[in-house]
Amino acid sequence: MADANEVITGSDYKRMVLGAYSEFLNEFENINAVKENSRFFYSGKPGSDVLRTMGAAVIPLSEAVNESIGGLSRRVADASVLGARGNAGVIVSQILRGLAKGLIGKYNATSQEFGKAFQYGILYAQKAVPEEKNRPIIVASKVVAKGAYDAVRAGKHISEVLNAAIQAGTESFARDMDCGEKILQVFLEGCLKGLQGNFSLPPLDLGSKIYEAKGIVSPLNDIARPYCVTFMVANPKLSVPLIEKELQEIGNFVVVERRFKAIFIHVHSEHPGTVLERAVAWGHVGEIHINIMAEPHAMAMVQQSCMMPLALLTVASTEEWGQKLQDAGAMVIIDGSDESGPSVEEIVNAAHSDIANKYILLTDSEHLRLVMHQAKRILGERVSVVVANNQEEQIYAVRAFFPELSMEENTAQMIEAVRKMAADE
């Protein structure tokens, strides 16, 4: 029985997340290899996708000021949700989001509270793909959750809870471990090693050549900016171009507009306080609004004027293919040349522009299905999603889009075009 006064601190949580990232650094290539023999179809490179998602998640830990477990877990979750890449990355980001939901408002957590939050994380992972109840990572997560539940009820320390979850998974997984099962196991083992301070690789040595040696992207290239900050500056002391230049150094999606004697500013940042600290030197700051973009439907509250009622947003792997999609009727093209595909944040930013009030999100790959749906959870009823299986189906779907029709009518037509194309193949 664990000591009733035993607590898990923000520092403990930080080590767990860093431990998970460290373990994925060590195992992502093995996960990619396991994919080839998995019982379930996995597109892309799941190990690489999860590694980059976790990379986005750990970046806030390098400069975190808030040491509460609730505050740290929230920042990690927000960054992972927006930084998620590929279907596997989305599922892992939802585990982190569920953990944060279970820890919200807590400075420290008892072992029992953390154990319950861990079960929240597994539940959120299951909700990410509710239509695929037999997906191995979902089946595995239910087994793992049962092992954790029994340990929590027995009042065990969090390290024992993690051990029980790992053991439950090990006993239930097939001899030839599926890719999804492997991802879950690596995550749990990494959390346990991190909690114990047993890192296999230096997780936040961002200047290290380890990334270059392994041929992977440094987390510094995957920084997520989860906070949408808007405010007015009255009687500004700087010009619009100078303010734009300064904001682009600390954020993205920068909009600076002169409105009579004031300036309206809209920027996405990982540090809202840094933006506002700069802004107070420009003039009188007011009408401040901060939205957490990682929260479902948060962006639906951000009002802006748009050029058209509906636009089609899609992903293209090359400039040539992007031009073909534009010629066929797509209005917004996202760069899909990265083998992990665009992150959730890249899609949200594109759909958050002032081009249209509503968007249809179209992808030509199963690999991006959950990424698109995670973007939809954030943007709410402003978007719908259509998934094609290849470029030929994608172009047929684009040709079925007519901007004068409603989002619902277009979505139905495009899905039907994909279905017919798939039936003819």
Image (cartoon, rainbow, N blue to C red):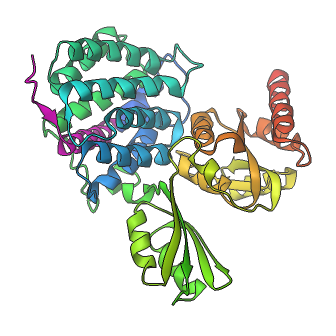
Query: 379 left or right of 406?
Result: left
- Residue at the image point whose x is 72% and y is 38% from the top: 384
Indicate whether residue 205 is drawn in magenta: no
Q: Which residues are magenta?
A: 1-27
Query: 140 left or right of 116?
Result: right
For residue 323, above or below residue 78: below
Image location (x, y in percent) of residue 161: 21, 21
Image location (x, y in percent) of residue 22: 26, 42
Query: 269 left or right of 297?
Result: left
Image location (x, y in percent) of residue 117: 32, 28
Res 324 visible: no
Query: 196 left or right of 246?
Result: left
Viewer-side residue, 414 vs 31? 414
- Residue at the image point whose x is 37% and y is 45% from the top: 74
Indicate whether residue 5 is drawn in magenta: yes
Viewer-side residue, 414 vs 153? 153
Res 331 visible: yes
For residue 146, above or below residue 239: above
For residue 183, above or below residue 410: above
Which quadrant of the structure image shows residue 24? top left
Dominant SS of magenta comes to: helix
- Residue at the image point whose x is 32% and y is 12% from the top: 146
Tell me the quadrant of the picture where the C terminus can be found.
top right
Which quadrant of the structure image shows residue 116? top left
Tell me the quadrant of the picture where the N terminus can be found.
top left
